[in-house]
Image (cartoon, helix red, strand yellow):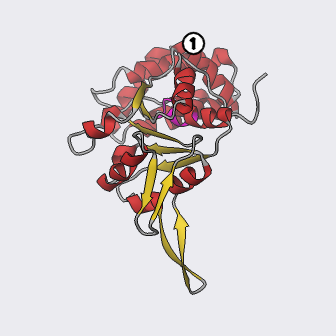
Amino acid sequence: MADPAIPYYAPTGDECALFEHAYHHRLPLLLKGPTGCGKTRFVAHMAARLGRPLFTVACHDDLTAADLTGRYLLQGGDTVWTDGPLTRAVREGGICYLDEVVEARKDVTVVLHPLTDDRRVLPLERTGELLQAPPGFMLVISYNPGYQTVLKGLKPSTRQRFIALDFHFPPPEAEATIVAEESGLPRDRCVPLVRLANALRDLKGQDLEEGVSTRLLVYCATLIAAGMKPDRAIRAAMIEPLTDEPDVRQALLRVAEITLG
C-alpha cells in the first residue's frame, strides 16, 4: 500500500533509482522535459521518499542570486540576515529544486557552481560565511528544452556539472493510470482523454508551442469526475489553455471531435 505521506508518482523507467544514486553519491541532477510531464512531482516524491526537506524555487526573469542565498532585511528597526531557500537547504541538509532554471538571471548559475563540484560549498559574501554542504544536501535543476534559445540556455560549463535525466510524457497506459489516480475518474474514462492528449501533442511545432501536459489531463478528468460534461471539460482544460487564436482553437476542437468520435 502506498504511503500517503509520499506524493503519488508512477515511475516509467529507472528514474527513481538514478535519483537515489545521485543523492547517495552527492551528485547534482538536471531534469529535462516538457512542461507538465511530472518533473516537479517526481522531485517531491523522491524528497519525501528519502526523508529530506524540499525547497522548491520557481525561477523567473527577475530571480537573482540574492533571492536564493539571502539578504539583510529590516525587522523591528534592526537589520537582520535572512537565509534564502538555497542557503536553508544547505544548512538543513535538504534538497533544493530550481524549476525552469534557465528563466533566472545569469548570476544564479554562477552561485551554483561551487555546490556542483567536489567542493560542495556555498560562499555567502555578505555574511563572510563559507557553508559546507552536508551529506543530505542535493541540488536539482530542471528546464524545458522546447523553450531553449541562444539567450535562454544552460552554458556547457554549467550543464557538465550535472548528471542528466530526460523526461517525457508517460506511455498511454501509464498516463491513463496516473490521471485516474490523481483525478478520481475511472481509468476506462481516462483512456480516451489520453488518446486525445497525444493527438494534440502531435501538433506541437505546427500550430502549437506546447502540447497538452499530464497536469492539464488531470484537471480535465477532475472536472469530469465532479460532474462537468466531457466536451466542456475538454474545452476548458485541454483546448483553451493551448492557444488564444480562434482559428487554431476551432482546429483543435475538430481534432477532439475526430479523436473521440
Nearest the viewer among 21 and 140 is: 21
- Image quarter for residue 244? top left
Question: Would residue 209 be visible to someone looking at this image?
Answer: no
Q: Residue at x 56, y 35 (%)?
A: 43
Q: Is residue 20 above or below residue 57?
A: above
Provide residue 27's location: percent of width, then percent of height: 47, 33
| Nearer to me, 219 or 149 | 149
Taking 198 as reference, is 95 left or right?
Answer: right
Residue 12 image position (x, y, % from top left): 54, 17
Above or below, 45 relative to 89: above
Residue 236 picture location, percent across and down: 52, 37
Q: In this rendering, would 125 be left or right of 41?
A: left
Q: Amino acid at mark 1?
A: Glu
Which residue lies at the image location 50% right of the left edge and 33% below the top edge?
39
Q: Specify the farthest residue to the right.
A: 1
Q: Against 201, is 116 above or below?
A: below
Quadrant position of residue 232: top right
Left or right relative to 40: residue 203: left
Residue 161 to residue 255: above or below: below
Q: Give the magenta range.
A: 36-41
Measuring 53% from the left and 17% from the top, which residue is drawn there? 14
**Label 1 secondary element:** helix
**Furthest residue in direction left, as rendered:** 150
The residue beneath circle 1 is: 173
Estimate how packed mark 1 is, as few (under 14), some (14 to 19) or many (20 or more) residues with alpha carbons within 10 Å.
few
Of 219 and 57, the residue lying toward us: 57
The answer to whether residue 203 is seen in the rendering is yes
